[in-house]
Image: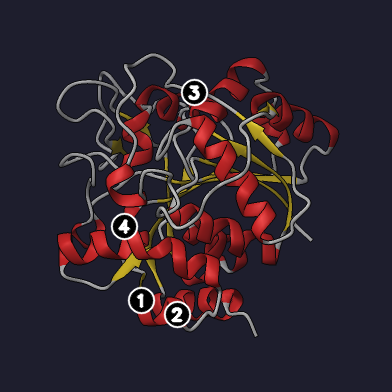
Amino acid sequence: MRKIIIDTDIGVDDAFALRYGSLLFDLIGITTVDGNVPVDMATKNAKFFCKIYKKNIKVYKGASRPLSIKPTPPSFDIHGSDGLGQAYENPCDAKADNAVNFIIESVKRAPGEITVIAIGPLTNIAMVLNLYPDFAKEVKELIIMGGAFGTHGHTGNMSNFAEFNVFKDPNAADLVLSSSTPITIVPLDVTNEVQITADEIQKTHDDFLINISKFYLDFSIKQKGFNGMAVHDALTIAYLKNPDNFKVIKKPCRVITDGIAAGQTVIPLSAAPSSNNCFKDLTAHKICIDVNVDAVKQGLLETLTLV
């Protein structure tokens, strides 16, 4: 069974990804990062997730702020003031060993065997690469939920250009995407295409997912008039389960780190020569630009449904 580490700023859709991933793969650890919620809250939420599902999975605490920019506010308006829809009292604490060290030691012990799935800002992964550059060749694969490239009109959700996870730490994202790590990017281009309804969530009979989703669904109704949600982060697991459900291109990718387009993921749009080639000698990464919506939804909901 594929060994995975999920690096998360756990909010509602992160919980769907954690559940999906824990059912399909050998989830050897959960690492947390500042993003949807502060890192202490993310750590408590990850522990609470393990408690709810009776999973003996250790949680590790990572970065509490971006590499260099001023931190931006959490997403309490979408995920609730606790990141999990304000549905439960969370009895867990935020004590945990270091996430960056855990990721490094894991890939050192089992080179070529660990897949890291990053569904929050990329601060931890950037720190891993800075401290241990061999991560790039020893990790089996890094799958990232982040970015937006304009397919189906899906651009940013934090600005006209920037997706949330990249926007929160664009310097970290540019460092990671500029590396030789084998990366697959699962951007808004595909995650926004897969929407699940409140009725579909109810039919999973998973009380935890049903309860934490209510706050997110209320937000969706108010903002979009739609009683459903995109489970963005869970599509990283869907990709790992069956990559054939995704249309992928291979391009080097960079991130704009300041100005009005800060957080935008950019790829070369032509092969025309340039005196200042921003992508020179960079590794081409897999970028998902389309998705078999019905197949991905069916796979997700069937796996999550409690019999």
Q: Secondary structure at mark 1?
A: helix
Tell me, yes or no, if residue 117 can be seen here: no
**Amino acid marked by disc 4:** Asp
Q: Disc 4 marks which residue?
A: 189
Rendering coords of residue 86 (x, y %): 41, 53
Image vertical order of residue 297 relative to residue 187, above or below: below
Residue 64 — which label? 3
**Amino acid marked by disc 2:** Gln
Q: Disc 1 and disc 3: Cα gap in Å? A: 33 Å
Q: Earlier in the sequence, mark 1 or mark 3?
A: 3
Rendering coords of residue 116 (x, y %): 63, 43
Image vertical order of residue 263 relative to residue 66, above or below: below
Q: Which-is-in-front pick, marks 3 and 4?
A: 3
Q: Earlier in the sequence, mark 3 or mark 4?
A: 3
Q: Secondary structure at mark 4?
A: helix
Residue toward you, 273 or 254? 254
Q: Disc 1 and disc 2: Cα gap in Å? A: 6 Å
| Residue at point 39%, 14% (across, down) | 68
| Residue at point 55%, 28% (across, down) | 124
Q: Disc 3 and disc 2: Cα gap in Å? A: 34 Å
C-beta proximity under 8 Å, tags 3 and 2: no
Tell me, yes or no, if residue 237 can be seen here: yes
Q: Disc 1 marks which residue?
A: 198
Q: Disc 2 marks which residue?
A: 202
Residue toward you, 294 or 33? 33
C-beta proximity under 8 Å, tags 1 and 2: yes
**Amino acid marked by disc 3:** Ser
Rendering coords of residue 53 (x, y %): 68, 61
Image vertical order of residue 206 relative to residue 127, above or below: below
